[in-house]
Amino acid sequence: MSLETQSKARGSECSRARIGAFTLLELLVVIAIIAILASLLLPALARAKEKAKVVKVHAELYGVGLALEMYADDHEGQLPPVRVNCNTDLSTHWCQFPIELAQEGYLAHGDKPGMAANMEDVFNPGHTYKYAAPGPQILNDSPGGNYKLWVPVDFPECASTSGKYYSSRTDSPVRWILWSLGPRPDSDKTQDSHAPIANRSWYRKTGDGGVIARMATRDGMQFKTP
């Protein structure tokens, strides 16, 4: 092959390479487009993930509600005591799920501190969902009188700011309540002084705070928050 022919062949190869390659500007434009699409899709994916977790919470609280009623049926209508821990290494595990439900096989048993019942709040890792009911309570592992549950005067609408504390299950319109701290455990709604029964403390939309709850009336009718 002559030098002229070789030169033409190399020139043709370089020309094809230039045609098939991206310039730096083109690469930057593609990267910018991908970044814009990602910024649009990620919030939607986060909302979908949060909604899926909320659905899971409702399903698990429904199952625990059934376990509570099964326990009551087997114990002459009595519910497990409420556990309150303060000024101890279990202070963040206040109102943890009843140990009795795990000990007697109504719920799976766990071996972590504060999680004798292995039902982890998907929005509060390392902690169970919460349980409360007017009546006997265990305060720092010892009997400690009765737990007082605040209930609004317009229960079950729960919109009123007026209410009353009940310490007796025979008097209270609420038999028991189970709840998750929701997607924003430290939000003002979740930490409301009358959470979890006041409806202003309930979770309602993605990106918002508030508790996700399930409760039973005195006559045993169950319902969940929106």
Image (tube, rainbow, N blue to C red):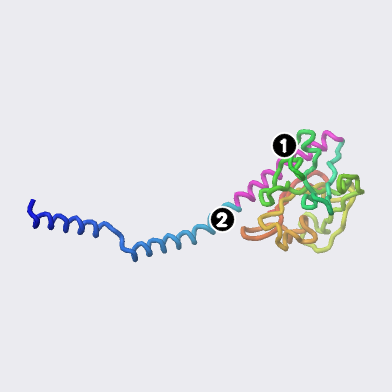
Mark sitting on residue 108: 1
Q: Is residue 11 left or right of residue 109?
A: left
Query: In the rendered image, is residue 1 in sight?
Result: yes
The image quadrant that residue 37 belongs to is bottom left
User: Helix or strand or loop: what does disc 2 sit on?
Assistant: helix
Q: Which residue is mark 2?
A: 46
> What residue sits 80% from the left and 42% below the top?
98
Q: What residue occupies the far right of the structure in this picture?
A: 145
Q: Label 1 crowding class (10 Å Cα cut-off): few <14, some 14-19, many 20+? A: few
Task: Check disc 1 and report its element: helix, strand or loop.
Answer: loop
Q: Nearer the viewer, residue 161 or 210?
A: 210
199 or 41: nearer the viewer: 41
Name the residue: 71% across, 55% down.
211
| Percent position of residue 199, x then y | 74, 59
Give, as a three-letter code, the residue at label 1: Ala
Asked whether residue 169 is in view, the answer is no
- Mark 2: few/some/many CA within 10 Å (<14, 14-19, 20+): few
> Magenta residues?
51-75
Dot 1 or dot 2, earlier in sequence? 2
- The disc labelled 2 sits on which kind of residue? Ala
Residue 66: in magenta span: yes
Is 75 placed above or below 205 here? Answer: above
Judge whether residue 150 is colored magenta.
Answer: no
